[in-house]
Amino acid sequence: MENNYDKRLGEPFLGVFSTSGSLWSHLDAAGKVEKNRFWQMPFDDFYMRQIDSCNANLCNTGGRTTGLCTVAIFLQDFVNGLACNDKEGSRQAKDTVKYAHIKINTPPGTKECTLPNLCTPKGLTGRPVRTLIKYICQQAALH
């Protein structure tokens, strides 16, 4: 699935995995303003079982059918402030930070976007930088 990601989700969408409903909502809203559309992806402890290992803390691959989901779960383990899983797959602590993993689907410079007013020209696009800046500005205005 990792290799065919943009074919399955489509050009306009970037997949977002998040531990927080409010973080997802704010990113989604910022994406709509900046015309960088997001799609909420499954982020469930089920995928942690795919990368559990008896030989190491984590295994960096979870099988053919769960590529994107296990990548997001795998990376989560390296973010300070997130709850970690014990060997039985249950949460040990409470999250103290909100986490989102944004999957940027098209490698830079590989193809042209066919959707007018949505994508940037072929080449290095910086997608979704505008959305992240919008999100940061919106959060700064709230605090």
Image (spheres, rainbow, N blue to C red):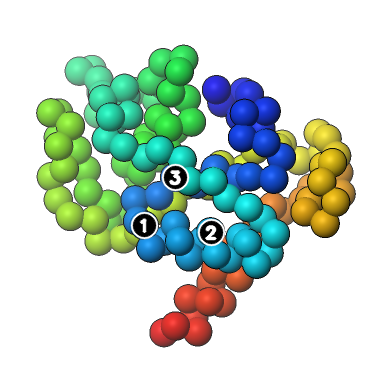
Sequence-wise, the earlier of marks 2 and 1 is 1
Give the residue type that dot 1 points to: Gly
What residue is shown with label 2?
28
Q: Tell me: residue 24, above or below residue 72.
A: below
The amino acid pointed to by label 3 is Phe
Kindly identify the residue that appears in the image at 20 percent across and 18 percent down: 54
Residue 87 visible: yes
- Residue 37, percent across and down? 63, 52
- Report which quarter residue 71 is drawn in: top left
Q: Residue at x 44, y 83 (%)?
A: 142
* Alpha-carbon span between mark 3 and mark 2: 12 Å
Question: Which circle's residue, 3 or 2, is located before the other in the chain?
Answer: 3
Horizontal side, residue 92 vs residue 31: left or right: left
Which mark is drawn over residue 17?
3
Element on which disc 3 rests = strand
- Residue 41 x, y percent position in the rendering: 46, 40
Distance CA(mark 2)–CA(mark 1): 10 Å
Residue 68, disc? none
Do labels 1 and 3 touch, CB within 8 Å? no
In the picture of the structure, the residue carrying the numbered disc 1 is 21
Q: Quadrant of residue 8?
A: top right
Circle 3 packing at 10 Å, graded few (<14), some (14-19), many (20+), is many
Instruction: Give, as a three-letter code, the residue at label 2.
Output: Asp
Q: Quadrant of the N terminus?
A: top right
